[in-house]
Amino acid sequence: MLWRTHVWIAFAAAITAGCALPEAAKIDGAATGGSGGSTGTGGAGGMGGGGSSVIGPVGLASTSAVVAATGMAQQTHIVFADGRYRLFYLDGSYPQQVRVRTSPDFVGWSDAAPLQLPADHGLEGRNLAVAHDPLNDHVHLTLSYSGGTNRSRLHARAAFSDDVVSFEPPVVVHTVSATAAPELAIDAPLVGITSDGRPFGTSGYHDDGAGAAAGSSFLWWADDLDLGELWQNAWTAPPVVLEAVPAFVHARAAAGGANGGALVFWEQAVDEPYGGNVRYALSTPGVPNAALNAFAPGGLQHPNDWNVVAVTPTEIHIVRRVLGPAQLQHRIFTPGTSFTDGPSIAPIELAEGGGLLLASDGDGVLLVGIRDDDSVVAARWSRDTGLPGSWGPWTDVATTPAKRTFLGGNAVAVGGRAAVVWTEGDPPALAIVGALVSVASPPP
């Protein structure tokens, strides 16, 4: 079955602030991932501590047969919750589990209790996404999978106590019949949480009861706000159709909006597999606003080569890599405006489909990508004396020879550093590797 990428990402409306990062152990060379983990590469100068702009690379977990273990760039698989990093991933050795690894410092990693699934996960890391709820320190998780003749998407919530992860029973949000449209599936769903605590979920395919997809961009709202201990994992309202497009939507994203809404994004699918623009709208439960273009007309992008980040609840940045001659485009959204051009980014040859991560500490922006030589690099935006600000030069994150794909991470920087992850190696010897990268520019 053709895998079609339908990806969203969600950010909390309020950027995490004042959260101290435990000092990482100072290690020379590589660092092991602990029980069940893999060995990380020394990267751009080994492990860093204290004032280093990069901590890592570090091996976080091994994962057999899951080629896209870290998912798409717009998805989140790693969060910082209850004082620890939490990695959620799929492993071919455990076909009916979502595996979890935890670390207090990003250096030493250990296994935590997994989420038991009702069916095999299908070895597709792009069908898993998580989101951290900073109001209650919970994590919400969604996963799509095939069970018998049907395709389903489930939702689960997890709570934490030190290195213990406790999942509540998952609930199936919606199911489609494989006989209705055999070539389509509920691929790469998203989970997000609004600023007032309402979970939402998305996917690119929904059976409207007539055996067909009613549109290409669907958004589900949970019935209730997540206000703490008691939350009913219920999704009874019909999904919102954001927009129907000429071809199937490949990638989607969202940034938390004010007043219980979300600023949602989706690729303007004009051809397989590329998109011609990124569309966006402010959606609140049951009511999407009119869709607009994030970029000026012209150009195509790979579905894995664009991303968004909320610097503040009302300042949203978007970057994409346009096909053809190496070109990165940056635009900025502020209240009362549409997206306007940001400053130019230094030209660089990035790998097509390698993934772009945008992260913020509430002031600056970090952009991370994979070069065409498989090294990982980063650039940083600062506002200087005000918008539109400026971009600094590219710096190294991981340079030792290795096959690196599906770069992603978390958009919310903790202690000034963003968690960056990628899939490393060739099947079946695959690993999830990552680094903590400073949002602020490194010293000269």
Image: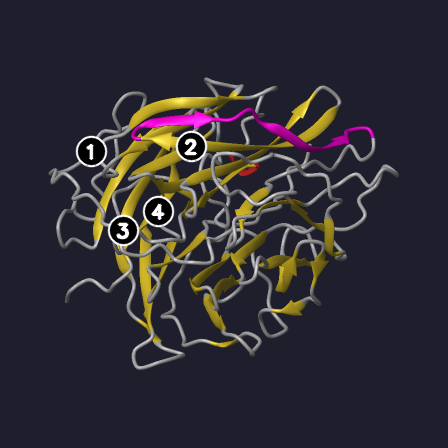
Residue position for label 1? 31
CA gap, disc 2 and disc 3: 19 Å
| Mark positioned earlier in the residue sequence (2 or 1) | 1
Quick one: label 1, few (<14), some, or many (20+) residues within 10 Å?
many
Q: Nearer the viewer, residue 246 or 107?
A: 107
Q: x, y percentage for residue 235?
A: 68, 39
- Of the numbered discs 3 and 1, the one sitting upstream in the chain is 3
Q: Nearer the viewer, mark 2 or mark 1?
A: 2
Q: Amino acid at mark 2?
A: Ala
For mark 2, give the secondary structure.
strand
Secondary structure, mark 3, is loop
Residue 109 vs residue 397, the one in the foreground: 109
Q: Secondary structure at mark 1?
A: loop
Most frequent secondary structure within the magenta stretch:
strand
* The C terminus: image quadrant: bottom left
Q: Give the side of residue 399 with respect to residue 187, left or right.
A: left
Q: Which mark is residue 420?
A: 4
Q: Residue 270: give x, y in percent of width and height.
A: 70, 59
Which residue is painted at 20% across and 62% down in the image? Answer: 442
Tell me the magenta residue range.
Answer: 162-179
Amino acid on which the number 4 mark rests in the picture: Val
From this viewpoint, which residue is outermost toward the right?
210
- N-terminal of the two: label 2 or label 4? 2
Kind of residue at badge 3: Cys
The mark closer to the camera, 3 or 1, is 3
Residue 370 shows which numbered tag? Answer: none
Q: Is residue 438 magenta?
A: no
Inter-mark Cα distance, 3 to 1? 24 Å
Of labels 3 and 4, earlier in sequence is 3
Instruction: Mark 2 or mark 3: name the one nearer the start of the chain.
Output: 3
Residue named by callout 2: 159
Image coords of residue 108 (percent x, y): 23, 31
